[in-house]
Image (tube, grey):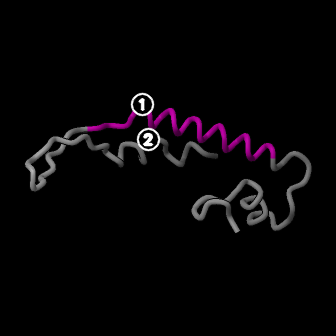
């Protein structure tokens, strides 16, 4: 079972690909590899995220509220970067 329903741990991923327990330093190497890409993805998202204002209508009146353009975050780090 994965620790996060969407993303397996490095060990779980390794076992699903290789079908055996990680040996040597493979697990640690994969974790470090993943950390590098997470850091790069977060940096890219922080630089490329765009926000704007939208009008929200309530019984009390209309207000301008900040909204983040989700696709600018999700598309900021292409999966092709992970090799």
Residue 30, horizontal then vertical, whole percent? 75, 47
Report if residue 37 lies within the magenta region: yes
Which quadrant would the N terminus be assigned to in this image?
A: bottom right
Asked if residue 73 lies in the magenta stretch, the reply is: no
Residue tagged 2: 76
* In the image, residue 79 above or below residue 3: above
Q: For label 2, count other residues whose C-alpha is less than 10 Å away and answer few (under 14), some (14-19) or many (20+).
A: some
Q: CA distance from mark 2 to mark 1?
A: 8 Å
Comparing 52 with 77, the one in front is: 52
What residue is pinned by disc 1?
A: 47
Q: Residue at x 9, y 56 (%)?
A: 59
Q: Which residues are magenta?
A: 28-51
Q: Residue furthest right?
A: 24
Question: For the point 83% across and 48% down, which residue is it?
Answer: 26
Marks 2 and 1 in Cβ contact (< 8 Å): yes
* Residue sitting at x 31%, y 43%: 68
User: Could you tell me which secondary element the residue under label 1 belongs to?
Assistant: helix
Under tag 2, what secondary structure? loop
Q: Is residue 5 left or right of residue 11?
A: left
């Amino acid at each position: 079972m994965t620790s996060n329903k969407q993303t397996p741990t490095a060990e779980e991923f390794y076992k699903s690909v290789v079908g055996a327990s990680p040996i040597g330093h493979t697990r640690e190497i994969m974790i470090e590899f993943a950390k590098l890409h997470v850091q790069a993805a977060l940096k890219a998202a922080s630089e490329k995220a765009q926000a704007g204002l939208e009008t929200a209508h309530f019984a009390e009146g209309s207000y301008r509220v900040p909204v983040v353009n989700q696709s600018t975050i999700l598309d900021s780090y292409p999966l092709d970067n992970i090799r």
